[in-house]
Amino acid sequence: MGFNTNLLHAGNQKEIKGATLPPIYQSSAFFQESAEDLAGIFANKKMGYCYTRVANPTINAFEEKITKLEGGIGSVACASGMAALSMALLNILEAGDEIISSASLYGGSIDLFRDIEAFGIKTRYVENNNWEEIEAAFNDRTKVVFAETIGNPCLDVTDIDKLAEIAHSHSVPLVIDNTTATPYLVKAIEHGADIVVNSSSKYINGSSNSISGVLTDSGHFKWTKERYPVLGEYIKYGPFAYISKMRSGLYRNMGTCLSPFNAYLNVIGIETLGLRMERQCRNAYELAKWFDENYDDITVNYPGLATSKWNDIANTILKNGYGAILTIRVGSKERAFEIMDKLTIPYILSNIGDTKTLVVHPMSTISLHSTEKELADAGVYEDLIRISVGIEDVEDLIEDFRTAIS
């Protein structure tokens, strides 16, 4: 089936009384017919539901759609994108372990990596796609490699195939944050990613009405007790070891579950992901090209432009477009604020992936806690405006920016 057909029908089950959407099972716990049945579910010996913190039918309906779209063997939906990233990493890491990560990260991810240093987990930052630097960062404590498909807000594009090849040569899994690209632009598992994380609050939901995140396991990585002792007893489940350990341990015990209502809103939102991304990517390209052709004093960054140093990789990795985010540098923080304040269509807020165009000043918001080096690595400058392009008529967006700038 094609992408949009999959969005509408993949993972769907016949629902009660002919409903075309899964019911919202807004229940904290679920009764069973016998004490033996409930005991079997708790012991992972019987299928069923016992407690929404562990599993819920509405949440599972959302997870099944994501699994189909990403091409994995299973997904786990969490209360936020940051929760999903935390679960993805902490499920296999312990004190003394190290992460190799692209330095051009979303500020919140950098903050998370800083926080888990308190648990004895160190992150080594490397320049994205700098293969010599990446190779040199490996040691016997390296347990995971991490990168974003399209950096936020750097907009560098990761060569997932090459990064996966290097990670696997060291018997280490590759975790890819696919939030800014979504499976519409790239199915990271097909390029070698082992775990894919999406902040589904963004493009997957599409309307900024639900905070959520989801991770998907490819089932391809060969886990071993020697290399990943925290998986221990779960190695016997083979390709399902990673998901089984998370379901039975960290996810359940740390309470990072998604609410059933938010899962339901995501199921609705994801049906139009392909249509929205098609329009948003086209609008972003047209807006970026307009900036590039009309303003010598404004520097535009968008991987779809031939002038972008990531254009070649983008043409290799991405399909159907180059993403819906662009950034502009306007000369000073004061001018950036002035332009943002004079815009009438875009909203000034720190999300991405909405149907509406959004603008933000990253240095004073999402990257506020980053060091000078972290800011430089992430492509964040005091005169930078990040634009998450929506589905408006692009002519209206261009005219609004033209008026604000003049």
Image (tube, rainbow, N blue to C red):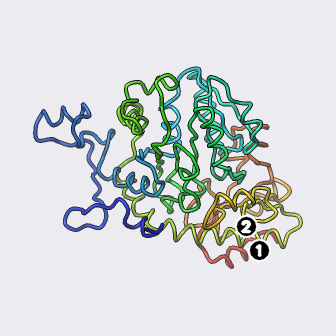
Q: Is residue 368 above or below residue 66?
A: above
Is residue 201 rendered to the left or right of residue 68?
right
How many C-alpha atoms fall within 10 Å of the one at disc 2: few (<14), some, or many (≥20)?
A: some
The quarter of the displayed image where residue 7 is located: bottom left
Q: What residue is disc 1 on? A: 403
Instruction: Report the side of 243 relative to 370 (left or right).
Output: left
> How many C-alpha atoms fall within 10 Å of the one at disc 1: few (<14), some, or many (≥20)?
few
* Between 287 and 340, the one nearer to me in the picture: 287
Which amino acid type corresponds to the residue marked 1 in the rendered image?
Thr
Q: Position of residue 2 (x, y in %)?
A: 46, 69
Which amino acid is tagged 2? Lys
**15 is higher (above) or lower (below) than 98:** below
Numbered disc 1: secondary structure: helix
Question: What residue appears at the point 26 percent right and 34 percent down from the top-left corner?
Answer: 44
Residue extending farthest to the front is 169
The first of marks 1 and 2 along the sequence is 2
> Quick one: which residue is furthest to the right in this view?
296
What residue appears at the point 48 percent right and 48 percent down from the top-left corner? 213
Q: Residue 130 at x, y = what percent?
A: 76, 42
Labels 1 & 2 near each other (Cβ < 8 A):
yes
Of 205 and 159, the residue lying toward us = 159
Give the structural element (helix, strand or loop) at label 2: helix
Q: Which residue is mark 2?
A: 342
Vertical side of 256 occupied by 328: above or below: below
For the C terminus, give its image quadrant: bottom right
Residue 353 at x, y percent in the picture: 57, 60
